[in-house]
Amino acid sequence: MTNRYMPKGGLQAVLCGLACTWNLTVLAASSSAPASAVTPDAAAVPAASASAPEPVSSSAHKLYEQARHQLVQVRTLLSGQGSQSSVGSGFFVGDGGLIITNYHVVSQVALQPQRYRLTYAGVDGRQGALDLLAFDVAHDLAVVRPSDKAGTAIAGLAFRPRTTVLDKGERIYSLGNPLDVGFAVVEGTYNGLVDRGFYPTVFFSGSLNPGMSGGPTLDEQGRVMGVNVATRLDGQQVSFLVPAEFAEDLLQRARKASPIKQAVYPELTRQLLAHQDLLTQRFMAQPWRSAGHAHYRIPVPQETFMRCWGNSTQPDSKGLDYERSDCSMNQSVFINSSLYTGNLSTRHEIYDGRKLGTLRFARQYSRSFRNEYFGGAGARTAAQCSERFIQNDGLPLRAVICLNAYKKLPGLYDMGVLVATLDDATGGAQGRFDAKGVSFDNAMKLADYYLKGYGWIQAKKAEAASPRPSR
Amino acid sequence: MDSSEEGRSRIAAPVALIERLDRDGHVLQSTLVYRWPMKIGRSFDADLVLDDPHLAPQHAELDDVDGQLHLRIGQTINGAVVGARHLQAGEVMALGVARALRLGNTRLRVRLASEPMAPEQPLDRHVTRAALEASAPLWRVVLPLLLVSMLVMWFDEWLDNDPGTPVNTYLSAMLMTLSATMGWALFWSLGNKLFQGRLAYMAHLRLALIYGLIWTALDSALPLLAFATDWSFLSHISGVVGAGVLCALVWAHLGLILPGHRVGVTAGVLTMYAVGIGLHIWFNEQRTGQMFTERYVTALPPPSWRLVDAKPTSVLIQDARALKDKLDKQAKEDQGDDAVEVVSGGDD
């Protein structure tokens, strides 16, 4: 029976929505052992350790008592048989009987309203159907309302005023229904905003579990300061909240909205187009960083909202030496459990094949160039590619641009660029740039921007015309 | 093939030839007939003694009656089969043009000296060639081919491995390819044995080595040419060309096994290739909107092998812009088929 509530691989990805691109190895390992992410007494540890000076649990008790009437579990049911397909949390807020939750909690209903329906269950056993009113896919938020408007009598939770800033280390309290086990309050600390995020995200040191998504996180005064959204599966108590201000903004928009009965693809597309515009604009406003190569200019993104990891071969290798750098955003936009989009990533590898000689190097350099994949199954069309020899200030490159179109999100594309330098018979650099869920124009702009990031470094420009001296 | 003409005068001209055939129609024994009647049976009194336990001592007699050959069945329980007729003991039948008869379990064919001979049939040249090849000392060709192939394999392994890789790595890889090639040749040799009665192993091994070298050459040259000329088509078709070489090899093996059926074999292999490639391309078109599986040229040989000029980045961007219409069309077509739908369960 418990197995039903154990997260499956796909849904761990949901929960790690913010963190999926972070540390793939660890994430993959934890997805085969989901129990590690949901150890039943994980939440008890900080509470016990923090209980020494002050009986903080009384605070949690008080807050839970205050908020329990506003707290609901949001269930997605299969339309026909009515068994639950996924569960999350939500809360009444303000005075209009509206419930805030995560977009990813209601995504099945938003995308396939004919197959799924939403219901809620309160702490006191109240139940009823829900209508989807509005959503903000970029911040992973949604507003729903009981179909019979039963909640209008309930005084919803209040938002913490935007102007009052929390300090690092302040206690905050997350509410929700983890793993469908029962409603719970989890204590933790506010730790500011996540570093290098594209959208502001609160770093909450507390144990969020699947099923708590969409629940409120309250300050000591019981005001909503964030919405539970994700947790890292490769760490402990590294959880994330959407700042309350975005929920407040969405709530304003939702007040006059009428229930959504059709699949939300047109609105989804509109929001994703706005997101990619902002992303492209902010990305292209930053100059490329240097990769630190002696001869080549290789485009490496600034780490304002991207993070780069590097590795290289062991120093005693007998074959090809390489240095690799992977840069990616730690946020993607959740569309459904198998589709994340709206993010950028780059990668480059610098090869030194002097120990291999020309022919052996060519073989391995080719193999690395071949070992690339341009998706195409499912939500996107197969890739279409263009390829050419191009040059930037004299540096010859082999470049491939591949594009996939989104089938249900017209006007959005995935774009991948492959580059290999072609000036040296025993060395070179290869790079890849990916932009997921961008407009065609932005895809072209980004490809151009990336390709022009390659060239000779200034000092070497002069000797570019003549063959390079042996390194 | 032995003739049983002992004790007969060589002065008289033979009037007929009787051949005993095996189950495949090959001649086991032939006997010249100098005079009629001709007694056939298991008894030593017979003119043609056949040691078939299903024959009677005096099983049958062939005789010339007024210029026409007759078969008379003796005291036998099994009788004879001529054409579609089963003759019982004591029956007589004029043989006419039907000259194939079965007495007991023995097949006989009779040819009369008096009837006009059919003109000489031209022999299929492939039959002659196959016969020549079967007796030629092929090791003189196969041995150098084997050496060249091993060199090519070694070079390919060498390219794949880092400096300092132990020799046994090369050896084991080469042995693997080599035994696969030899196994392949053996497979076709067995076919040869089945249809031609001899293995002709060297001839089949020679084919496998030659076509293997052709395949290797094309498979490496096409991507390199594609790189040199920036004509990516050359690289994309290398798979289809490779399949063509494989089909040609099968065709050549079949040619040795069935030298008399060259036209049928050619038509069969061509059809197989055309249908296979057609299905492959059709499947790719359906799945990816492109004829070939390869998305881009992956070969990156030494830079000096490039023969064409590098263009400004804007030219590539222009190329890529042209993909939009095709992608949009494909997205629209695909949209009906499937969607972004994934049914997942559990907690969020």
Image (cartoon, coloured by chain):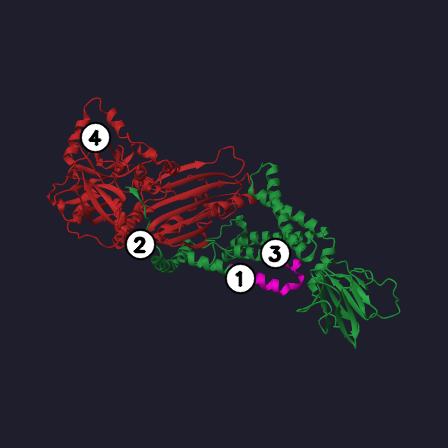
The answer to whether dots 4 and 1 both sit on one chain is no
Find chain B in the image and tell me its colour. Answer: green
| Residue A61 figure quarter | top left
Mark number, residue B274: 1
The answer to whether dots 2 and 3 both sit on one chain is no
* Of the two numbered discs 3 and 4 in the rendering, the one whose residue sits closer to the viewer: 3
* Chain letter of the residue carrying label 1: B
| Distance from Cα at disc 2 to Cα at disc 1 | 39 Å
The answer to whether dots 2 and 1 both sit on one chain is no
Find chain A in the image and tell me its colour. Answer: red
Kindly indicate whether the residue at mark 4 contacts the one at mark 3 (C-beta within 8 angstroms): no
Q: Amino acid at mark 3?
A: Leu
Kindly state the secondary structure of the residue where label 1 is placed.
helix
Q: Amino acid at mark 1?
A: Ala
Span colored in magenta? B253-276
Task: Please give the residue where the numbered disc 2 appears in the rendered image.
Answer: A409
Q: Amino acid at mark 2?
A: Leu
| Residue B325 figure quarter | bottom left
Mark 2 residue crowding within 10 angstroms, few (<14) / some (14–19) / many (20+): many
Mark 1 residue crowding within 10 angstroms, few (<14) / some (14–19) / many (20+): few
Task: Please give the residue where the numbered disc 3 appears in the rendered image.
Answer: B249
Task: Please give the residue where the numbered disc 4 appears in the rendered image.
Answer: A171
- Looking at this rendering, what residue extends furthest in the top direction? A52
| Distance from Cα at disc 4 to Cα at disc 1 | 72 Å
- Compared to A81, does B129 lie above or below? below
Q: Position of residue A295 (x, y in %)?
A: 46, 42
